[in-house]
Amino acid sequence: MQATAAHTAARHATAIAVAVTAGHFINDAYGAMLTPLTPALQGKFGVSIAAVTLLSSVYSLTSSVLQPLLGILGERVDRRYAAALGPLMTGLGLTLMGFVPWFGALMLLVAVAGFGSGFFHPSGAAYVALNSPPQKRGLWASLFSAGGTAGMALGPVFAGVGLTHLPWFALIGAVIAVITFAVTPSSLAGGRRIGLAEYARIFRGPLVWLWGMAVLRSLASMGYNAMLPFILKDRGFGMREVGITLAVYAVASAVGGIVGGRASDRYGRVPVLRSAILSTIPPFALLIMSSPANWWFYPLTFLVGAAVNASIPVGVVAAQEYAPGHVAVASSIMMGFSWGFAGLLVFLVGALADATTPTIAALASLTLLIPSALIAYRLPEPRKAAFE
């Protein structure tokens, strides 16, 4: 009888993880539609390139930079609503972009979509953390992360149908929202009212250093991705090669995250963080100096993408274990705030490219992995405490 109950509980936990991972997939697929659609939006609303690019900044602000605040709010209400309604908000906001009458309304719609994404990520990660077996936290977190990576790879394909037909994709998010709400249990963090001062104390000690490590690693990766089209253009290649390279990099990121997450369950979070970042530097430098004319370019792209992103889910689990009583907020610091903060700084890479060359700017971004690795070496191994 006891074994049957344990088996039922394990199946329910798996169903919860699958539901929120599906939510992560469709949520990030919606988010990845925005950039490919900016030329169409510029033509429809008759605005400048700078104005239409501002939409990405608005989405980044509400979905990533503000994510810790949304994570705090998510701990004060039932996570079930954030996990279910988040992708629905993102989907409605980004699939209806072609149906608003003026550009100001479009910016508001994109901001609402970003809030949906910002609400979902902490809650989704918290559900995975709370339901994963302690000995497989890294693996479960990496599968959740891989769902989002797969969505980001598929989002531009969705965008290819154009603004007019885009609302049909909102139905996918609606179905997943219903399933998620049906599967996930009501979940309120803790049993007492937590003040803002206590939330502020979460962001200190090893969690601050972990965040700094993640910002530097993210900026190195973003800097390379931002410079890649210009680097390949200078070497005589077009958007086809850029698209293939980014697709290989995205697939490798998902695979690397799963391998890194499982390895961290066996060998510890901090050893995997250290080795994943430090071992990436030499092949990353070779990749920046290579091109699709070299036979090793795409295999090397896969290797680098897997290595540099192997530490992403590991960092999320480490943050949760540093702050076991606030898994949603800890997740938001690593998933949204680190990427969002790095995104705000990536324009510096572009400025350096204007002053020098895109290759030099990408190599300069790569050097950020050195202090990132040094920070990883000062991190203590987190305890595998019970989550609340």
Image (cartoon, helix red, strand yellow):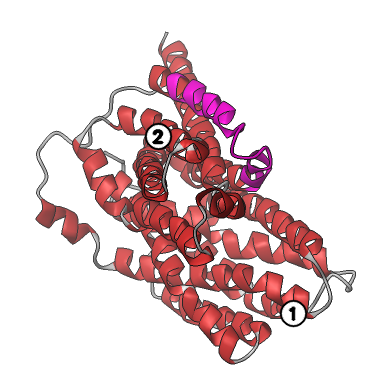
Q: Nearer the viewer, mark 1 or mark 2?
A: 2
Direction from residue 151 to residue 89 in the image, left or right: left
Classed neighbour count for the residue bearing mark 1: other residues with Cα under 10 Å, few (<14), some (14–19), many (≥20):
some
- The residue positioned 60% from the left and 50% from the top of the image is 40
Q: Position of residue 285 (x, y in %)?
A: 69, 80
Q: Which residues are magenta?
A: 153-178
Q: Residue furthest top?
A: 1
Q: Is 325 placed above or below 26 here? A: below
SS type, badge 1: helix
Dot 1 or dot 2, earlier in sequence = 2
Mark 2, Cα crowd under 10 Å, few <14 / some 14-19 / many 20+, is many
Quadrant (top left, top right, bottom left, bottom right) of the N terminus: top left
Q: Residue at x 54, y 86 (%)?
A: 352
The x, y position of residue 65, in whole percent, is 35, 58
User: Predominant secondary structure in magenta?
Assistant: helix
User: What amino acid type is highlighted by mark number 2?
Assistant: Met
Q: Which residue is mark 2?
A: 89
The residue identified by callout 1 is 286
